[in-house]
Amino acid sequence: MKSLRKYSQAGLVVSIVAGAALAILLCAQCLRTYLYVGRVLVPQEAGLEAERYGGALVTAARTAGITDPRAISPVLEHALEGASERVIWMRLVNQDSTILAQAGTPQGEVKVPPRWWERAETRESLGRVIDTPRGKALVAMVPFRMPRPPGPPGPLGAGRGGPQGRSE
């Protein structure tokens, strides 16, 4: 009888140790997943949302008939009001890092990285996480194609050198 009790206690101890080891492994896996989501997936999804938002702003500029990038500030202000919980500021800059329009209270200087267009075409992330007074924020750079202003017909058709409605 004593040997049977000894084996039951040993089995109980082994089960408790195995259960504790499994609990530690599962806790470590949960922590690893939490950190991965916070460091990789959330910024990635925020960058994709910024791209969608940029596309919506291009559509809004076309609908409003805006062809001068310096005249888009009211559209940016309106868009910022509608997304005040998700968007802190917006800037429209050219390839030389010159600010053409902005909305909100931008933080820091803007600098367009070299070969940014190649990186944008390969869907490489053009964003980084920064600290702001409102908490952490993703600063993302997305392409913004303004509609071309109407002009004299070019060699390829109406507009300035190309078919009407084409944006660059």
Image (spheres, rainbow, N blue to C red):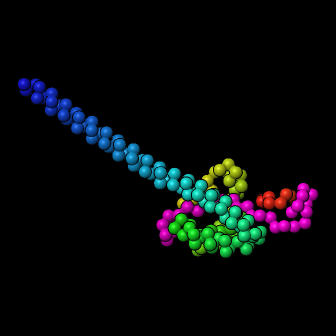
Instruction: Report the residue that reaches farthest toward the left.
Output: 1
Q: Is residue 137 visible?
A: yes
Q: How many marks?
A: 0
Prevailing secondary structure of the magenta residues: loop
Give the camera-side residue of 41 and 131: 41
Query: Which quadrant of the view contains residue 154?
Result: bottom right
Left or right, residue 17 beside residue 81: left
Query: Which quadrant of the view contains residue 26?
Result: top left
Left or right, residue 109 beside residue 61: left
Residue at 68% x, 73% y is 73
| Rendering coords of residue 52 (x, y %) | 62, 58
Query: Which quadrant of the view contains residue 101?
Result: bottom right
Residue 44 inside the magenta-drawn segment: no
| Rendering coords of residue 162 (x, y %) | 86, 58
| Rendering coords of residue 113 (x, y %) | 68, 59
Residue at 43% x, 51% y is 34
Please identify the quadrant where the C terminus is shown. Answer: bottom right
Residue at 92% x, 57% y is 155
Looking at the image, is 4 positioned above or below residue 48?
A: above
Please identify the quadrant where the N terminus is shown. Answer: top left
Instruction: Report the residue that reaches farthest toward the right.
Output: 155
Give the camera-side residue of 5 and 69: 69
Left or right, residue 26 beside residue 148: left
Residue 148 inside the magenta-drawn segment: yes
Looking at the image, is 42 positioned above or below residue 77?
A: above
| Rendering coords of residue 80 (x, y %) | 59, 70
Give the camera-side residue of 153 and 118: 153
Q: Is residue 109 visible?
A: no
Q: Which residues are magenta?
A: 130-159
